[in-house]
Amino acid sequence: MTDKHSTPGRRHPPGNLRTVLIRETADILGEEGLSGVTLRALSHRPGVSRTAPYPHFNDKTELLCVVAESGFQDFGSRLAAASPAGPLAKGPRSTS
């Protein structure tokens, strides 16, 4: 049975819808910018009902804060992996 509010889009695989919504929001930001992010557009992409994001996020502001936090965590992880001493290593910095 199809929810009358659902729209055809990419169906998300079974699992954590919150994670899917965060990833889709990051994709929308990259493709369309901030003006492209709406909870309605977001629900369309994974093919869920328009109300599906609300149990996970109170509003667009909360969603964007979570996406930003996720991005900073990813950046920190990549930075740590790229630096053999780690990003918080103490000691003199090379000027060469």
Image (spheres, grey):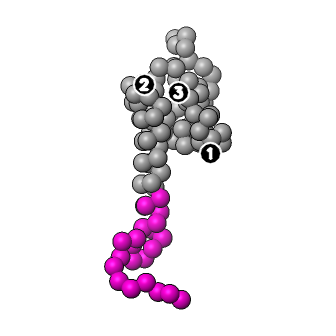
Q: Amino acid at mark 3?
A: Leu
Query: Residue 45 lies in what quarter of the image?
Result: top right
Measuring from the top left, give residue 6's x and y in whole percent.
Answer: 56, 18
Q: Which residue is mark 2?
A: 54
Which region of the structure is painted magenta?
A: 75-96
Under circle 2, the secondary element is loop
Disc 3 vs disc 2: Cβ atoms closer than 8 Å? yes
Under circle 3, the secondary element is helix
Determine which of the numbered discs, if any, sits on residue 30 in the image. Answer: 1
Query: Residue 30 lies in what quarter of the image?
Result: top right
Mark 3 vs mark 2, CA separation in Å? 9 Å
Which of 47/21 is in front? 21
Q: Main secondary structure of the magenta part?
A: loop
Answer above or below: position of 77 versus 62. below
Q: Amino acid at mark 1?
A: Gly
Q: Which residue is mark 3?
A: 39
Measuring from the top left, give residue 96's x and y in whole percent.
Answer: 53, 89
Determine which of the numbered discs, if any, sits on residue 59 in the image. Answer: none
